[in-house]
Image (spheres, grey):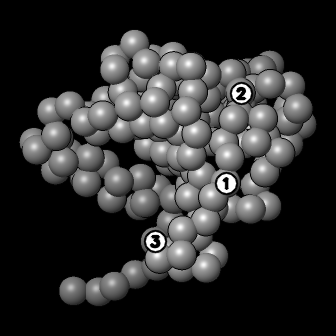
Amino acid sequence: MEIKKSNPEINEKVHHLLQEYNRAFMQDSEDYSYYIEENGEIAAGIVASAIFDTVEVEFLCVAEEYRGQGYGKQLLEQVEKEASAKQIKRIILNTYSFQAPDFYKKWAISSFSKSHLPSRISLSSTSSRNCNKKMAIH
């Protein structure tokens, strides 16, 4: 047995192993991942999946040259639309305070702090027209 430093290719394989294992126990899981292509390149993408009544956004990224064009908003709205149609109650995503805070505010996420959480983590939550709750962990 040898512990080695991982890389993106290995990370993807480990993630796939976990997904395969979880599938046996979580028949309600579904993929909510999309991307936007511009001129043959990936301009933006969202990696998300639903388990039971919650969609968890694992990654949301817009290439720097395409920021400010509404791609992130379109991707989140696509996930929200699909989740709403399937009676999903929550969309959860993790982010850091330096990762587009104005963008998330525009997406109607309001911050509130929880004293029982570590100081560098806060939950954000709001009601939306399509889903009951949206939350971001900062």
Query: Pointer 2 and pointer 3: residues touching (CB < 8 Å)?
Result: no
Q: At 57% from the left edge and 27% from the top edge, which residue is drawn? A: 128
Identify residue type, mark 2.
Answer: Lys
- Tell me the number on the disc at residue 111: 1
Eyeballing the image, is 130 above or below 10?
A: above
In this orientation, which residue lies closer to the viewer: 103 or 61?
Answer: 103
Q: Mark yes or no: residue 63 visible.
A: no
Q: Residues within 10 Å of mark 2 (few under 14, many from 20)?
A: some
In this orientation, which residue lies closer to the viewer: 52 or 9?
Answer: 52
Q: At 77% from the left edge and 20% from the top edge, which residue is drawn? A: 38
Residue under label 2: 73
Query: Pointer 1 and pointer 3: residues touching (CB < 8 Å)?
Result: no
Q: Residue furthest bottom?
A: 2
In this orientation, which residue lies closer to the viewer: 41 or 94?
Answer: 94
Q: Quadrant of residue 83?
A: top left
Horizontal arrangement in the rendering, residue 37 relative to residue 65 (left or right): left
Q: Residue furthest left?
A: 24
- Where's the N terminus, which quadrant? bottom left
Eyeballing the image, is 37 above or below 104?
A: above
Question: Which is nearer the N-term, disc 1 or disc 3?
Answer: 3
Q: Position of residue 66 (x, y in %)?
A: 85, 32
Task: Judge depth for marks 1 and 3 and give the one in front.
Answer: 1
Residue under label 3: 6
Identify residue type, mark 1.
Answer: Ser
Q: At 80% from the left edge and 19% from the top edge, which residue is drawn? A: 39
